[in-house]
Structure formats: structure tokens, C-alpha cells
Image (cartoon, rainbow, N blue to C red):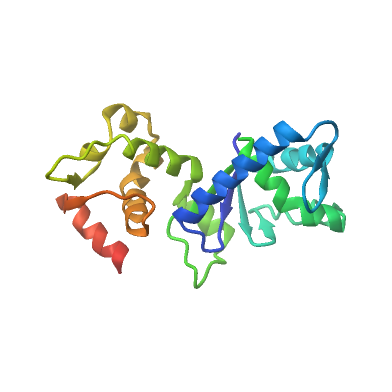
Amino acid sequence: MNTKICLINGADVNEIRDMGVTARNMANYVANVCKGDAITLPDREISTAFLNRVAEHLDRYELIFLDNDRIFTNEDIKAPFMSSLSDAERESLTTCIGILVGQGRIELCCPFHADAAAPEKSADELAQSKRWVSYTFIERVQAELDKISVGLNGLSMCEDALFSVEFLQSLTQDEREMLMPCTMKMVMAGAINLPVIELADDEEGEDAALAA
């Protein structure tokens, strides 16, 4: 099972992509610089035993919700695991999660329609909706769009024009459903720079909804 850490603090697709890159850099630092039983960072030292303990505990859950310093699941992860941590371990928990994300041991996600004004939705509601995207999915979409060679007439904002058949076939059903909504949001946020001059008929309504 690949545990997913789902941010519910209003993070958007740009922020989750940047956080994923940071997590990967953290993991590379640990792999290339830190040897032995200690992970020495500029502001703290973390034992590899504690990192593995965090990974083993998180691996018990399919989906975990993180809101700043609050971490919880449907089964309430806060107790007894959180109560078993020392102050130093509790302060290092977020760092451990970042390293584990970068190592690919857990996956970083955010709700697609995260509401910054009311981010604390129930775990049950978020778990049932499954309307979230992972930073690895965002990177895959971005890498695929980077391959596009744009002609003088621009291109149509539809998945058949933007993505290869091979890429579309590689997606799960959930990823396919999120592909164009996520792409539209990335374009509107400036994460992807495409000279789009025309919308496909089935995208016009979605564009208006996202702009609302």
C-alpha cells in the first residue's frame, strides 16, 4: 500500500509541485550526505530509526490528512502515536514526512478543490470524494506538456490535442477524470505556459467554473 499524505491547508497545484521538489531534494541530501544512524540537518538531527518508525506507522493507513501541525486519519492517528513522541520527535515529524515523500515511500497530495477559507473539512468527506491530485501526477502532466511543439495556429484545449495516446492510456480512471480540470487549473495559475487560443466545446463550461 502506498500511503498518501493529503494537505488540507489550502495548498494549490503550484505549491504542492514545489513541495514535492523540495521533498526530493531533502531525500537526495539524506542519501548523499548523511551516513550512519543520524540524519544531520542544519537545524536538527534525526535518527534513521525514528524516520523508519514514522514510515512504519504511516504505512498502516491509505490516506492521511495534514493541516499545518495537525495530522489525522479516519482512525485518528493522533493517539496513541502522537502522544508517544517526545517534543523533539514531534518537531521533527514534518521533516520526516518530507524525507519520506522525497524517497517515494509516501505520496504527497492535495484536495483538488481545497477551500482556503474553510480548509478543515472532515476526514470522512475527503476520503470519500477522492478529488485530490499528487505532486508526481502534476509533474507527469507538466513533463508531457513540455513535449508539445506549438504551431502558428496554437492548439485546442482538449486532451486529445494536448496529450499523446500513450500518456492517456497510462492513466488510471481517477487520473483521467482529473487530467483536464488539473491542467486547466495549472494553466490559469501560470504553472504551465501554453499559447491556447481556443477551447474545446466540453472545456468552455469548465473554464467558466474554474474562473468563478
Q: For the point 51% across and 71% down, which residue is it?
A: 118
**Residue 144's x, y, as percent?**
35, 36
Q: Residue furthest top?
A: 166
Residue in the foreground of this view, choosing between 169 and 61: 169
Residue in the foreground of this view, choosing between 89 and 85: 89
**Residue 13 higher or lower than 143, as above or below:** below
**Residue 125's x, y, as percent?**
51, 58
**Residue 14's x, y, as percent?**
46, 54
**Residue 108 higher or lower than 105, as above or below:** below
Indicate left or right for 12 with 142 as reference: right
Q: For the point 20% across and 39% down, which residue is it?
A: 161
> Quick check: can you spot residue 79?
no
Q: For the point 53% across and 48% down, which residue is it?
A: 109
Residue in the foreground of this view, choosing between 152 and 67: 152
Q: For the point 61% across and 44% down, which residue is it?
A: 23
**Residue 88's x, y, as percent?**
85, 55
Quadrant that contains the C terminus: bottom left
> Quick check: can you spot residue 144?
yes
**Residue 141 higher or lower than 115, as above or below:** above
Q: Residue furthest bottom?
A: 117
**Residue 132 higher or lower than 36, as above or below:** below
Quadrant that contains the N terminus: top right
Residue in the foreground of this view, choosing between 114 and 91: 91
Q: In which quadrant of the rendered view does residue 208 lie?
A: bottom left
Indicate left or right for 66 with 32 as reference: left
The number of discs equals 0
Indicate left or right for 43 with 125 as reference: right
